[in-house]
Amino acid sequence: MFDQDAMLWDEWADTYNEKSLGPAAPVAAVLAELAAGGPALELGIGMGRVALPLARHGVPVTGLDVSTKMVRHLAERTGDLPVDYRLADMASFTLPGRHTLVYVVASTFYLLASAERQQGCLNCCGRALMAGGRLVVEASVPGSAALPLESGVIPRAVDEGVAKLSIVLHEAQTQLLHSQEVRLSADGTSLRKVTRRYVHLDELDQMAAFAGFTLEARYNGWDRTPYEDGQERHISVYSVPGQLGGGLGEG
């Protein structure tokens, strides 16, 4: 699985569009507060969309990723910022030292395509945190407009000389969404398959509890508007037992 994921994201590294995920400044501001001055760990650091602005807040960041090409791009952008990375599977990792914050954003958690791998990830997160440390999970809400649970064809972009679309197959029993990301251009057609396992909020809370976490807060956005049923995105903040500085002030 690690090798397959690495090959996929290496293929995407040169064309991956970070801007489609929205501005990172508000994300980094909230995470910096939650890190309470301590070191942070990002799962799926990619090219540093969040890690770099978080490091500019003075938070040392270590990131995990499976893609050599992604972290190569990251290294080119890091400069003197306190950002480090490890090539590792986020479902099974061990790191020296402990962190005050672990975070995984932009539905990256769903790329762990089985309940066992997702639980393994949360277990590793618990071991990577200091007493009182926090875990932040940002993801689309299954069944919302942001993550429809149905098979079909979804147009993504139509630009001069290029069109992008997703062909999606939904497996309800396994909670899997298999998508073929298609890019059509004068240069030819490219296909990249992605499999995601979505997680409903009650299941995520149960998995987190099994790993030793307690839910502290759940937001709809990085302005920390409280989450309400039916919204498209959640930002869930969990903690492990203990005392850590830094609060959960309202936005």
Image (tube, rainbow, N blue to C red):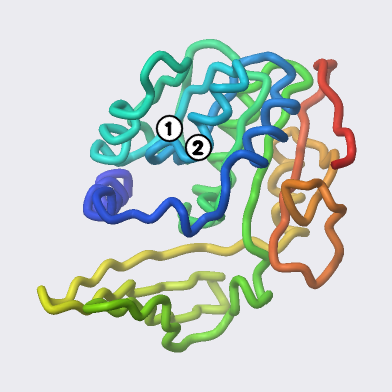
Q: Are marks 2 and 1 in contact (CB under 8 Å)?
A: yes
Residue 216 vs residue 235, the one in the foreground: 235
Location of residue 58 in the rendering, given as x and y in whole percent from the top left corner: 60, 16
Label 1 amino acid? Leu
For this rendering, which residue is in front, 183 or 40? 183
Which element is circle 1 on?
Answer: strand
- The residue labelled by disc 2 is 43
Q: In the figure, residue 201 lies in which quadrant?
A: bottom right
Residue furthest to the bottom? 152
* In the image, residue 100 above or below residue 112: above
Q: Which mark is residue 64?
A: 1
Residue found farthest to the top: 97
Q: Nearer the viewer, residue 132 or 39?
A: 39
Q: Position of residue 198 (x, y in %)?
A: 58, 64
The mark that comes first in sequence, 2 or 1, is 2
Q: Residues within 10 Å of mark 1 (few under 14, many from 20)?
A: many
| Left or right: 241, with 47 as reference point | right
Q: Amino acid at mark 2?
A: Leu
Q: Residue at x 47, y 40 (%)?
A: 49
Side of 17 where 242 appears, left or right: right
Residue located 84% across and 43% down the image: 217
Disc 2, SS: strand
Snapshot quadrant of residue 25: top right
Q: Residue at x 37, y 65 (%)?
A: 194
